């Protein structure tokens, strides 16, 4: 499964283990829905014109996933786990987000 893991750069999610990430919050969900994806990508490219396309792809897909999951009422910790790869011993498994992308690639 290692080649499948290379379909996206693994996002580093700093907040996944913060105590407040495990608390459901309507204010957090509302704030997430206000995120403008296009603005975020333009901001990143403006700050770093040499940013790799794979990093922008992770940014866009992670933001879309974050917004959708928050709309369904998931907590930040749950969302972060969906976006993070699993490690078993030294083996790396793709994240749920990567699996969705892989399946979409093969269907499209």
Image (cartoon, helix red, strand yellow):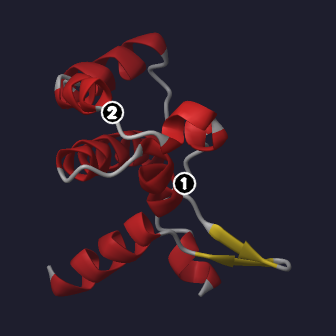
Residue 58: x and y in percent read 41, 47
Q: Which of these two is toward me, 46 or 79?
A: 79
The answer to whether 67 appears left or right of 1 in the picture is left
Question: In the image, what residue occupies the spot 54% across and 74% down?
Answer: 94
Give x and y (percent) for residue 17: 65, 42
Indicate the quadrant containing the C terminus: top left, top right, bottom left or bottom right: bottom left
Disc 2 is placed on an element classified as loop
Give the CA distance from mark 2 to mark 1: 28 Å
Q: Position of residue 6 (x, y in %)?
A: 56, 68
Q: Is residue 49 left or right of residue 68?
A: right
Question: Which class describes the residues within 10 Å of circle 1: few (<14), some (14-19), or many (20+)?
Answer: some
Q: Residue at x 39, y 47 (%)?
A: 75
Looking at the rendering, in which quadrant would you find the N terminus? bottom right
Q: Which residue is mark 1?
A: 9
Q: Is residue 47 above or below residue 72?
A: above
Residue 25 numbered tag: 2
């Amino acid at each position: 499964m290692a080649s499948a893991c290379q379909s996206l750069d693994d996002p580093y999610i700093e907040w996944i283990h913060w105590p407040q990430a495990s608390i459901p919050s309507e204010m957090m969900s509302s704030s997430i829905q206000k995120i403008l994806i296009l603005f975020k990508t333009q901001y990143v490219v403006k700050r770093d014109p040499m940013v790799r396309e794979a990093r922008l792809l992770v940014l866009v897909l992670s933001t879309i996933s974050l917004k959708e999951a928050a709309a369904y009422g998931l907590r930040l910790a749950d969302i972060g786990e969906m976006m993070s790869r699993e490690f078993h011993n030294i083996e790396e498994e793709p994240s749920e987000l990567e699996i969705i992308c892989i399946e979409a690639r093969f269907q499209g």
